[in-house]
């Protein structure tokens, strides 16, 4: 262990020396410790401010009238806050093909459908790899790890050509199919870790008492794995809500089916420098997911981090 | 009843008299089919939407699949390695590859460095402060990439952007004599463009690295590092002799994940550069341009996708090996 040689490098000071300087040294260390804690906290606050600043700037810009946005000395906060940027985004007058609520609805429909499909399929698969020993089990796990690494960028050409004859381009269904499959490898891995932590004895006891497989699943496994299911669902939701390249390629010019990220990109392309309305759309797209994240932070991060720490 | 389900002796009346569901259940039990049945839907989805397209991309890359072939005017033909030779002869390809690789080489270590510094700091903060700072940082991570890209474009925009405004007010000896107030980060060239994207990517990626490392740091017994510190080892030495060796497996996973993420940046480059400036292409933009800009050449795009996958496969191989070594498969 490398730790032990470090501890052994320096012999402790002789007791006489320590006793002589104890009084003064104690105050000094206390002051030093307090200064250190203050410094650390200051550093922490600085990091928090730096990371939060861009988000703050987005929201602040969204409430500024255009003469303030292009003023020679930018203000941190809007001095005459206005909702007109949001009105433009909501009325849909700028793009001419619909209010932002339409794209909001599309994004929510796609993300929720993805969550439901991915959660059901992933839970089944996770139970299989966590509860059963079967041939190919290791192969399946390795396959999932590899598939998780395939970027949608590399598949987009084939997906585009496959979905075209099926009339799934320009539809939300097409997006849901791709997003669900994409979410599966990670969600199966996450759920597998959750299922594996549930002691098997419970199920075995129930089986001995004559409970059917379905009953064991719904009464014992499901309630215990529910927190894991929440974490994976959030993961699948956010992945689908944020996805860009597939939506960009599939939706093309089919404006009514745009999801929020594609609408934002389109809006940005249409109004290069109208930062007020662009930041208003961006805010309306970002803030819900940020708030959602704040509510569920602990569950999601715990699950994801556990996955990464464990492998 | 129990006999039937466990596949023991046949019931008195013979199999045919039992209800279908019971017989099915018995069949599943006898042949131990349950795990396969549970896996089938998920694996079918993965195979159809992720694996089959990958094979198709590989097939296209050896054909001449373009607009005429997609419409059905002309038959698809095998063209051998033609798409690859075209690609390797194109100086634009090498430029995009260079941009992609250089970007990853710079952004990955920087992300890991910032993540490490913040992770170590979080570990020494009080509990409340630690949660506050990590939550604040994770908001950057939770921001959708499209929003983040356009937001950074706005902060770095000429005429009104905050970064140019600040730089223009800095003394010349510090920031050079460039006319910062109308400096266009997105269109001036690959270096300023990717500087901006690197800041964006680090801003979005470091919180996850920091929080993951924090989880790892919590598993290291405090006595180990404290004993070393009491004995006068510098924090630098403590980190390299104790912390880093213990966190090495986590670092390996984070390194590989970061390589893949940073090699994949498309959403950011597409929203900030668009398909306008060839000098700023990375592999993702180059591939997208070849495959979807009129006239579309799906085969050329397929060849690029395949090259892309081969590069990632090397990284993925390392990732899988790291996971197996950690005993993640047991």
Image (spheres, coloured by chain):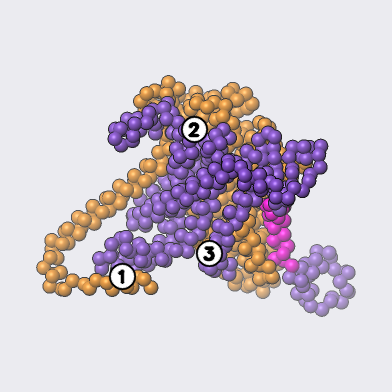
Chain ID of residue with mark 3: B
Q: Position of residue B194 (x, y in %)?
A: 47, 41
Q: Position of residue B197 (x, y in %)?
A: 48, 41
| Pointer 2 local density, CA inside 10 Å: few below 14, some 14–19, many at least 20 | some
Provide the residue designation for mark 3. Answer: B322
* CA–CA distance in space, label 2 to label 1: 52 Å
Specify the colour of chain B: purple
Image check: A133 left or right of B177?
Answer: right
Residue at horizontal 29 percent and vertical 35 percent from the top: B173
Provide the residue designation for mark 1. Answer: A6
The letter of the orange chain is A
Residue at horizontal 34 percent and vertical 48 percent from the top: A44
- Which residue occupies the extreme left position in the image? A20
Provide the residue designation for mark 2. Answer: B187
* CA–CA distance in space, label 1 to label 3: 28 Å
Q: Which residues are magenta?
A: B33-54
Secondary structure that dominates the magenta span: helix
Residue A55 visible at all: no
Residue at horizontal 35 percent and vertical 54 percent from the top: B121
Q: Secondary structure at mark 3?
A: helix
């Amino acid at each position: 262990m490398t730790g032990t040689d470090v501890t052994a490098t320096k012999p402790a000071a002789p007791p006489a020396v320590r006793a002589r300087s104890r009084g003064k040294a104690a105050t000094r260390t206390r002051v030093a410790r307090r200064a250190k804690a203050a410094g650390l906290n200051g550093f922490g606050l600085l990091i928090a401010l730096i990371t939060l600043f861009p988000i703050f700037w987005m929201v602040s810009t969204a409430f500024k009238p255009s003469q303030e946005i292009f003023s020679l000395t930018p203000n941190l906060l809007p001095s005459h806050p206005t909702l007109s940027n949001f009105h433009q985004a909501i009325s849909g007058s700028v793009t001419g093909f619909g209010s932002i609520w339409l794209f909001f609805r599309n994004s929510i429909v796609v993300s929720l459908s993805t969550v439901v499909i991915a959660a059901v399929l992933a839970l089944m698969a996770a139970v299989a790899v966590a509860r059963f020993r079967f041939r190919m089990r290791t192969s399946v796990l390795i396959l999932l790890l590899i598939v998780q690494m395939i970027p949608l960028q590399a598949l987009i050409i084939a997906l585009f050509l496959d979905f075209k004859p099926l009339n799934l381009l320009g539809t939300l269904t097409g997006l849901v199919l791709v997003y669900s499959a994409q979410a599966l490898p990670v969600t199966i891995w996450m759920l597998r870790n959750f299922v594996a932590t549930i002691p098997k004895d419970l199920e075995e006891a129930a089986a001995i008492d004559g409970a059917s497989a379905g009953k064991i699943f719904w009464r014992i496994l499901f309630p215990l794995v529910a927190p894991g299911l929440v974490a994976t669902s959030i993961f699948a939701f956010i992945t689908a809500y944020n996805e860009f390249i597939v939506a960009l390629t599939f939706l093309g010019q089919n404006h009514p089916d745009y999801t929020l990220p594609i609408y934002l990109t389109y809006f940005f392309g249409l109004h290069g420098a109208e930062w007020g309305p662009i930041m208003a759309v961006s805010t309306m797209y970002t803030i819900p997911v940020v708030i959602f994240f704040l509510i569920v932070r602990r569950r999601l991060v715990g699950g994801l981090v556990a996955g990464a720490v464990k492998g | 009843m129990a006999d039937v389900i466990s596949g023991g002796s046949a019931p008195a009346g013979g199999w045919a008299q039992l209800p279908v569901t019971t017989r099915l259940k018995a069949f599943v039990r006898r042949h131990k089919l349950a795990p396969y049945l549970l896996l089938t839907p998920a694996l079918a989805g993965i195979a159809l939407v992720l694996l089959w397209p990958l094979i198709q991309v590989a097939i296209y890359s050896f054909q001449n699949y373009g607009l005429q072939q997609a419409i059905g005017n002309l038959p698809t033909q095998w063209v051998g390695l033609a798409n690859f030779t075209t690609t390797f002869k194109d100086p634009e390809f090498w430029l995009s590859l260079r941009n992609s690789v250089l970007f990853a080489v710079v952004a990955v270590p920087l992300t890991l460095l910032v993540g490490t510094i913040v992770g170590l700091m979080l570990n020494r903060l009080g509990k409340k402060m630690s949660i506050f700072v990590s939550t604040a940082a994770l908001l950057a991570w939770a921001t959708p990439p499209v929003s983040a890209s356009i937001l950074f474009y706005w902060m770095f925009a000429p005429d009104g952007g905050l970064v140019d405004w600040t730089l223009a007010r800095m003394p010349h000896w510090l920031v050079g004599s460039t006319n910062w107030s109308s400096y266009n980060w997105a269109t001036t060239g690959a270096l300023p463009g990717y500087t901006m994207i690197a800041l964006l990517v680090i801003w979005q990626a470091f919180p996850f690295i920091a929080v993951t490392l924090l989880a790892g740091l919590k598993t290291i017994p405090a006595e180990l590092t404290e004993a070393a510190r009491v004995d006068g080892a510098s924090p630098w030495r403590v980190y390299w002799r104790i912390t880093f060796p213990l966190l090495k497996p986590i670092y390996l996973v984070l390194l590989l994940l970061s390589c893949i993420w940073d090699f994949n940046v498309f959403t950011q480059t597409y929203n900030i550069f668009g398909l306008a400036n060839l000098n700023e292409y990375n592999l993702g933009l180059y591939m997208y341009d070849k495959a979807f800009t009129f006239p579309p050449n799906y085969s050329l795009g397929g060849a690029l996708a395949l090259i892309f996958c081969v590069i990632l496969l090397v990284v993925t191989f390392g990732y899988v090996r790291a996971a197996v070594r950690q005993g993640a498969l047991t």
